[in-house]
Amino acid sequence: MNRIVSAEPLPHCRLKVVFEDGLNGVFSVEPARRGGVFLKLLDARIFEAVAVNPDFGCVEWPGGIDLCPDAMHRAMFSFKPDEELHSGAVLREGVQRNHRAK
């Protein structure tokens, strides 16, 4: 399980996050897209009250709003989608690198 060790609120409902494994980056929470209870996070005062739950290693806000650290880790540090990996530009770059290596 991925655990978050620190989270800092940034403008535009984003979080600067550091994981226990050393990976770090910026996560866009997108409360308007998520809807429901996440809409409360559009209030800057509530969003800025983010904390890291020491028992579960997740980010949470007052009112029982939280995000799964595993899902955040995957979203922030996953590979490119297949359609990007197989685009013409990426394939050409791979061919050019392989050609130069010979």
Image (cartoon, rainbow, N blue to C red):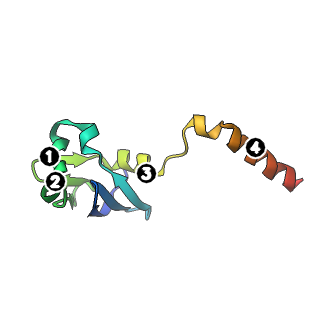
Q: Secondary structure at mark 3?
A: helix
Q: Residue at x 11, y 53 (%)?
A: 62
Disc 2 to disc 1: CB gap under 8 Å: yes
Q: Which mark is residue 50?
A: none
Q: Where residue 53 sits in the image (x, y, percent)?
A: 21, 58
Dot 1 falls on a residue whose secondary structure is: helix
* Crowding near the residue tagged with mark 4, few <14, some 14–19, many ≥20 C-alpha atoms within 10 Å: few
Q: Amino acid at mark 3?
A: Met
**Residue type indicated by callout 4:** Arg
**Which three-letter amino acid code belongs to the residue tagged 2?**
Trp
Q: Which residue is mark 4?
A: 92
In the rendered image, residue 76, in percent from the top left (x then y), is placed at: 43, 51
- Check residue 40 in the rendering and tell me which mark sits there, or answer none: 1
Mark 2 against mark 4, which lies toward the viewer?
4
Q: Nearer the viewer, residue 75 or 69?
A: 75
Residue topped by disc 3: 76
Q: CA distance from mark 3 to mark 4?
A: 26 Å
